[in-house]
Amino acid sequence: MRKTDSAFQKSELAKLLTACGESADFLTFRLHENSPFFIAYFKTLVKPEIIHHDILPTVKEDELYTLGDIKEKLSIEDLSITDNIPDIQDKLMTGNVIFYKKEGHPACLAVPALAVEKRQVATPETEYSVVGPKEAFVESLDTNLNLVRRRLPILELMVKELMVGKLSKTRVAVVYVKGIADPENVNTVIKRIQGIEYDEVVDSSFLSQMIADNKNSLFPQLLDTERPDRLASVLAEGKVAIFSDGSPTAISGPVSLITYFAAFEDYLSIWNVASAFRLLRLFAVIFSVLASSTYVAVLTYHYEMIPRDVLSLLITSRGSIPFPPFLEAILLELAIELLREAGARLPTKIGQTIGIVGGIVLGTAAVQAGLTSNVLLIVVATGALASFTTPIYQLSNAIRLIRFPFILLAQLLGLVGVAVCFAFLMSHLLKLTSLGRPFLEPIYPLRVEDFKDSIIRLPFSKQALRPLQIRAKDRVRFQQEAPQKKEWDIDD
């Protein structure tokens, strides 16, 4: 063994290459018989076409004596020469090919050759709309940023990249519009992401939970979206967005509870139609939360409130039911949740079949067996349907769980229990914040000006200012012209 080889084997670079060589997909070899250079890379991380078409043919043409000579010959961007071992390790693990010598200075030339596997941009699945764009984010961070920049082609669109996760080393991008977004919101997001101590972050949902103001709340405090058009819209409002490499969704904030009742399709429809649908969703969620608990409370404590004709119908339907209303409601609610979970976890076609057939079979069998009344079955099924009207899936999960405490307190205290549970819910929502901003805005604190795009959506001509909750640096969307007096003629 030559002296230079012996010295190399004792170096930190040799130890790194030896550790990498324990994996079957790591390759290292001499460029050619007379070359002083060796090449090393993980074959599962690099693109073979780049190595065999762009790198090897170029470096084998001439006699090259230094790493600088190789760097000058290769027409590839982002080449770097370094002797920092942790940096060399990071380069290897992120799809770089390294050139090194076994004698002389232990420096390496890193050549990017990463193989990026990604799916094509497809249509949204969880936020599908009948009209409007049909593009959705994918698992590639660069592709997602491209989709946003195409919609906001301005220099003020800022992207700050961070690395999160001790093991996963996930690329995270914080995106905002400079001059519109509040710097306090931007700094809050960046500091919270930098403060994350976790080994693996594989999706933006991880970040949403880790940087939330209240990590124990059932309610989501940042908005998840898979639509580039919706994200571009909230960025233009002054919000801050967060992307995670490998995740097909982005999160944004600050948000309010009313935001979760607004579908992006509302902005593609006539304003009065969109407002009607928003109100419908709001009342549907309230009905979903209160329907079963009100049924239990009224039949247990307040049956004198029921009209005589309706009471006779309830007596007939419950004549042979062996369970009290509370247990009857709990059993049906749990059956609905079982059907939901089964339909969500099974493959799409089988899940749809299980949901429809299982619901019909179980409901019919339960009524015919005398285990539940047909009236309660209608109430629970309608409440379950109403919970699906929320455009954001995360909120519907919270609604599903909230119903059970309401039913329990309805059994204990009747309508007073429902009122007490509702008071606890409202006190929680009043204390909840999103990036430090009130979660119930514009209801509390009351901001009448922000009602123009909350429970209802007014025409675009009435939305000259951005919402107060976001604290945008530039609140003016456009200059509103003073209305001109119309001169009437005989034809009018």
Image (cartoon, rainbow, N blue to C red):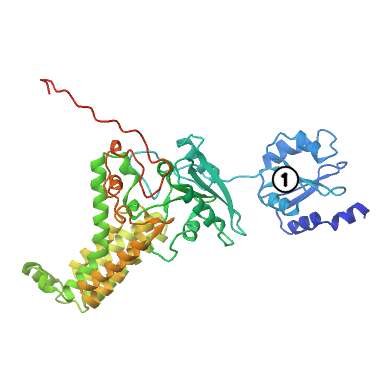
Q: In the figure, residue 266 lies in which quadrant? A: top left
Q: Nearer the viewer, residue 23 or 486?
A: 486
Task: Give residue 417's position: percent from left, percent from top.
Answer: 24, 73
Depicted 229 relative to depicted 388: above or below: above
Helix, strand or loop at label 1? It is strand
Q: Residue at x 73, y 56 (%)?
A: 20
Q: Position of residue 258 (x, y in %)?
A: 32, 53
Q: Residue at x 35, y 56 (%)?
A: 352
Q: In the rendered view, does 53 fall on the left or right side of 236?
A: right
Residue 372 can be seen in this image: no
Amino acid at circle 1: Val
Task: Answer above or below: position of 63 versus 238.
Answer: above
**Residue designated by label 1:** 97
Q: Is residue 125 left or right of residue 75?
A: left
- Residue toward you, 463 or 141: 463
Image quarter (top left, top right, bottom left or bottom right) of the N terminus: bottom right
Q: Is residue 13 above or below residue 327?
A: above
